[in-house]
Every structure is written in C-alpha cells, then in structure tokens.
Amino acid sequence: MQNISSYHTAFVAYLEDKIQVKEPATLYDPIHYFLDLGGKRLRPLLTLMTADAFNGDYKHALNAALSIEIFHNFSLIHDDIMDDAPLRRGQHTVHEKWDVNTAILSGDAMLIMAYQLFEFYDPHTFRELAKLFSKTALEVCEGQQYDMDFETRDDVSVEEYLKMIEFKTAVLVGAAMKMGAIVAGASQEDQDHIYEFGRLLGVAFQLQDDYLDAFGDPESFGKQVGGDIIENKKTFLYLKALEFSTEEDQLQLQHLFGITPTDATEKIETAKQIFQSSGSADATRKEIENYTNMAFAVLDELSIPEDKKDLLKEFGNDLMNRRV
C-alpha cells in the first residue's frame, strides 16, 4: 500500500485533469471554484486506500474516488444554501459569491457529474457502484432533513441524534471505502465489512467533531470553537448534558440554546462548564472511543494480510487524532 501523501497527490492531479473548463461558464465556474477550495479529501483517499488494500490498482479507483468527492462537495453547496452560510473553508460560499439560483444549478450539475464517472467501469462494476451510490445519496438527504427537523424540536433523543449523524456523515465514509472494495473485486463479505468499518469510524469522527467544536484548539481544529453552541445545535454533548444535569442546569442549558446574543462568549463558556460538570464531556469521549474500537474490531473480519489491517487501523488513529 502507498502512503497517504501518494494517494493525495494522485487524486488531486486526477481531479485537476478531469474537471475541464466548459461552457456555459456561469454553470461550471462555480464548480471549479468550490472544488479548488480544497479540504482534506478524506473520502476519496479512503476509496483509493481500500482498493489498494484488496490488491486492486488504486489508480483504477480514481473515477469512483472522484465521484465521492464531487458528491460530497455538491452536498456542501446545497447545505450552505440551507444554512445561509457566508463562508466555507474561509472563502465565500457559492451562493454568496454568485447567487442562490446559480448555486442550486451548479450543485445539481455536480450530482450528475458524480454519476457519469461510473460509466468508465464495466457493466457489473457500474451497477454495483451506482446501486451503492444511490442508496447512500438518499440516506445523506435523509440525514440532512433529520438535522433540520431537530432545530425546531426539544425532544430529540440520543438515539435519534446518532441515527442523524450516521446518515448525514458516516454512511458516505462507509460508501467511499466499499467503492474501493467493489472496484478491486473484493468478495461481498469483505465489501460489507469494510463498509461497516467506515460507517463506525464515521460516527466516531462526527462525535469527535462535536467534542472539538466545544473543547478543541481553534488553530488545529480549523473552525470557530463554540460554533455549535452559537447555532443552538442539539449535539451529543448537549443531549447528554440534559440527561445528566440537575434540573437547574437543565433549565439554564435549555435557555442558553434558545437565545442568540450578539456576543456569544458568555453563552459558550457557560454551556461548556455544564458539559464538563454534568459528565457529558467525559461521556462523549467514551462514546468516541467506543465507536472507534467497534470499527477496529471489524478489521479482524477482513480477509486481507495483517500488515494491511494495521495500515487501515493506523489511518483510523491518525484520523481521530486529526493528523490526516
């Protein structure tokens, strides 16, 4: 297997070569702009790495990897519209730089482009990739809807929240890895196991993202600390704090997550104090560890050499420690 930087270099070069300048510019320029914003490209790297792990030529998986990356970015463009977000990766969002109609249409074009990339594979592989992609894309939409529904609900359960992040985030991680296995011709059993590894790791990653949003280092985290608190998002931290807190702290937390002060500094600090004093912060760290360990346990079921399992585990550890 290659190292992560090799996969990244190969993928970025392929993306730049494949995404050509086309007309009308008003449709394609926003696509180029958004894809050029970069990011860690984690999902396509997982596709390439998995193809390699199952003794496939990872370069043969580049179209599947690009499909995953284009779909992920399409979903971000539409998410930004729904959230009315002004910035993405420190730059203007597409609907801010152009307008909402342009962002919707360019996003739609990206979804079609993602499907087109499967046409480079033989009929059996095309069918399997398209079937997985369609299932995953619909689940991501369901996860986004759950997320929006939760904004107006005061009775969200931990189980519902975990289902939401599984659909909105984790299934795409699982699909990225299963696509690599499909392209490599892995057995159905191995395909299912690597999907489960990715899904579980995806849940752990999102829970860690929730935790770092409140308690992370802003420089290494790469986002504004306390953003979820400012936006009144009912994360795992919030839900567990409600479950563990005294009635007084419950009322204070519910009050905090019902206001939008101009200066949110005090709101953020008070919420974080409740997260810690209630035991919610500790419970979240334990749940991250639990999902990570469940993901690593799945690796034992894969019919690949131990050294390749170790590399996948190393990647998982690097991902959870934000080194990739």
Image: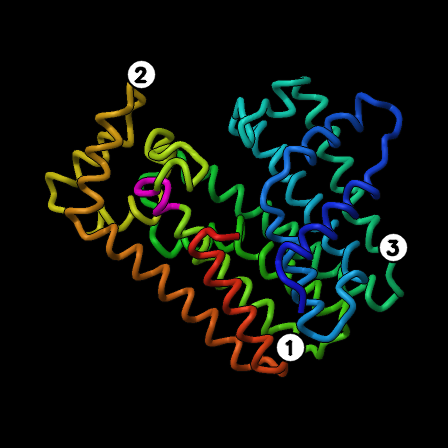
Circle 1 residues within 10 Å: few <14, some 14–19, many ≥20: many
Q: Is residue 72 left or right of residue 237?
A: right
Check if mark 3's residue and mark 2's residue have beta carbons within 8 Å: no
Mark 3 packing: few (<14 Cα in 10 Å), some, or many (20+)?
Answer: few
Height in image: 144 above or below 263?
Answer: below
Please provide the residue range marked out in magenta: 210-216
Q: CA distance from mark 1 to mark 3?
A: 24 Å
The quadrant in which the N terminus is found is bottom right
- Quadrant of the rendered image containing residue 233: top left
| Secondary structure at numbered mark 2 | loop
Locate residue 104: give its quadrant: top right
Q: Which residue is mark 3?
A: 119
Residue type, numbered disc 3: Glu
Q: How is the image coloured?
A: rainbow
- Residue for point 77% across, 74% down: 185
Q: Which residue is mark 1?
A: 190
Image coordinates of residue 58 in percent, x first then y, are 75, 64
Residue 262's mark? Answer: 2
The amino acid type, in three-letter code, at marker 1 is Asp
